[in-house]
Amino acid sequence: MSNATHPGQDGAGVREYLQRFGIYTILGLFILWTLVPIVWMFLSSLKVRSGMFQMPPQLLFEPTLQYYQELLFGSNPLTKYLLNSAIVSIASAAIAITFGTLGGYGLSRLRIKGKKHFAFWIISTRMAPIAVVIVPLYLLYQFAGLLNTRLGLVIAYTTFNLPFAIWLMRSFFDEVPEALEEAARIDGATQWQAFYKVALPLVLPGIGATAIISIVFAWNDFLFALIFTNNETQTIPVAAAQLVTQTGTLWGQVMAIGIVILTPMVLFGLIVKNYLVSGLTMGAMKQ
């Protein structure tokens, strides 16, 4: 058995090594770019003010929970803002997913003239900047009595999430072979039963991915929550903005509230990460 190296084999090995080195380098830089600010924010939230801006920064220090206690148990506790954010985020995502799934299925299965143009028009409504629709929506909300209510926020978020949900769900249903539903209908199932028992279970990862994106959008929104709410219905991004006062920025509380805002989304993402990966890769491979 000969151990001779074929011509070009060394070159291929070097290219593969360089490709891996490049990929790992880019991933390492991306991880540093993402994690360093979060770690710095977390450590700063546990330091006294004089230690936050100390150079060089101290990694070993006596931690304090002072800023978290002030946020959670102070004169204006964060709990109501967290509750408002959770309610409007989950409610708007649930509505968007429900109607987005039905709309996406209809666009995928129905034979209607100009379907592609209609689908593009739906997603084009999502391309409009929020600032463009703020004034008309504000006037409508004032007329309908929806200002300073959670329902108003839920409607606003649903309005922006629904086109995105329909577009995404349509692409997920396109990946489900229609032959499966036709076989179910031959066996006696109705159109609704074919949708509910055959197509819907196959796009559950897609529903999970769309739900995550919808919740994250509503959770992070600042402009709608700032314009359409009062002190009782404001969400946590608005509460964070209130920490920049006329006398200065409350940096300790800013760092702490950043961690409070980030933690639920990170935990939620870890719980549903399998759905997110499966949903975003649906259709990436065709048989």
Image (cartoon, rainbow, N blue to C red):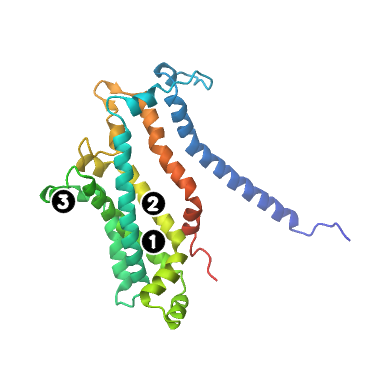
How far across and down, in percent of the image, does residue 36 sit?
A: 49, 33
> Which mark is on residue 168?
1
Residue 287, visible in the rendered structure: yes
Q: CA distance from mark 1 to mark 2?
A: 11 Å
Q: Tell which residue pokes out farthest to the right in this image.
A: 1
Image height of 111 relative to 170, above or below: below
Determine whether, in the image, residue 29 is placed left or right of residue 104.
right
How far across and down, in percent of the image, does residue 63 sit?
A: 47, 21
Q: CA distance from mark 3 to mark 1?
A: 27 Å
Other-residue count near label 1 (Cα within 10 Å), few / some / many at <14 / 14–19 / ≥20: many
Q: Identify residue type, mark 3.
A: Pro
Q: Quadrant of the C terminus?
A: bottom right
In-front residue for pair 187/287: 187
Residue position for label 3: 136
How far across and down, in percent of the image, does residue 48 sit?
A: 42, 18
Picture quadrant of residue 237: top left
Q: Which residue appears at 53% of the width and 65% of the height?
A: 285
Determine whether, in the image, residue 158 is placed left or right of residue 190.
left
Do the residues under discs 1 and 2 have CB atoms within 8 angstroms?
yes
Q: Which residue appears at 39% of the width and 73% of the height?
A: 193
Residue 174, visible in the rendered structure: no
Query: In the structure shown, which secondary structural element does the residue marked by tag 3 occupy?
Result: helix
Q: Identify residue type, mark 1.
A: Leu
Image height of 74 relative to 147, above or below: above
Q: Which residue appears at 20% of the width and 37% of the height?
A: 230
Residue position for label 2: 213
Query: In the structure shown, which secondary structural element does the residue marked by tag 2 occupy?
Result: helix
Q: Identify residue type, mark 2.
A: Ile
In-front residue for pair 109/54: 109
